[in-house]
Amino acid sequence: MKNNFLKRLISSLFIIPVVFFIIFKDDYLFNLFLMMCLIISLYEWNKMIINQFFKILGIFFILMSFYSAYYLKASLIKFDIFSFLVILLICIFTDIGGYSFGKILRGPKLNKISPNKTYAGALGGVICSLIFLYLSLNYVNPLQKFNIIFDFKNVCYVVIFSLISQIGDFIVSYFKRISNLKDTGKLIPGHGGILDRIDGMIFVFPFAFIMNFLS
């Protein structure tokens, strides 16, 4: 368990800065990175799912999700870079909070689909996301130029995004369970495959895409 946690931590400390560098550095680099993740995600999904209906449905949904991420990043006139990063970080901190609170507090299990998930972990994911947003808006100076405040509306957005991210985690966990797999792949030490790492994001980005059109 400790060995897996160490692998997970080291991988995260390497991956997160690299991803942020790609997002800020260049659109072409970001699009290439996005395409690589898409191809690997489709491969992992196709390999994991036996039922043809769910396989086709999942392929369509993954394509739609990656297009949503591409569109939101490309349309920064309406959707600023901070909002794009917030979506990523809400998913990341939801995962960190869920993992940490779940391991420390334990308690009742949420369901049988993902036996490691607990009510404490689910609540911890939301709390950790809210703490991240509050600290970012109040103490990270470069972010203050966006004039975003920690109000009721933004709190609701964070809670909704965090819950959707957790739902995505459950759905992917369900398909892993019926496929008798622990992870969708072995690409990332301590995490598994690409889908293991972005299972929440692929559900949050389409929701953010719809919200962007409605705003």
Image (tube, rainbow, N blue to C red):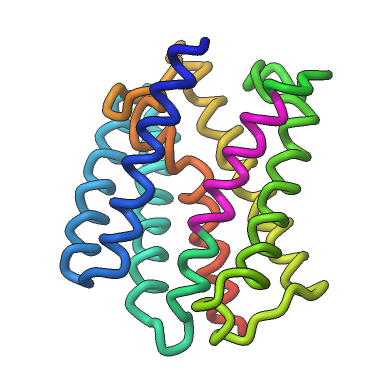
Which residue lies at the image location 54% right of the left edge and 26% below the top edge? 173
Residue 83 in the image: state x and y as whole percent: 52, 72
Q: Main secondary structure of the magenta part?
A: helix
Residue 6 in the image: state x and y as whole percent: 44, 21
- Does residue 62 appear to the left or right of 88 in the view shown? left
Q: Is residue 117 above or below residue 70?
A: above
Does the magenta portion include 158? no
Quadrant occupied by the C terminus: bottom right
- Does residue 62 appear to the left or right of 212 in the view shown? left
Q: Which region shows up in magenta?
A: 88-102
Residue 70 in the image: state x and y as whole percent: 33, 67
Which residue lies at the image location 79% right of the left edge and 30% below the top edge? 120
Q: Is residue 181 above or below residue 63?
A: above
In depth, the one of 43 and 183 nearer the eye is: 183
In depth, the one of 16 and 80 nearer the eye is: 16
Residue 9 in the image: state x and y as whole percent: 44, 30
In depth, the one of 101 and 55 nearer the eye is: 101
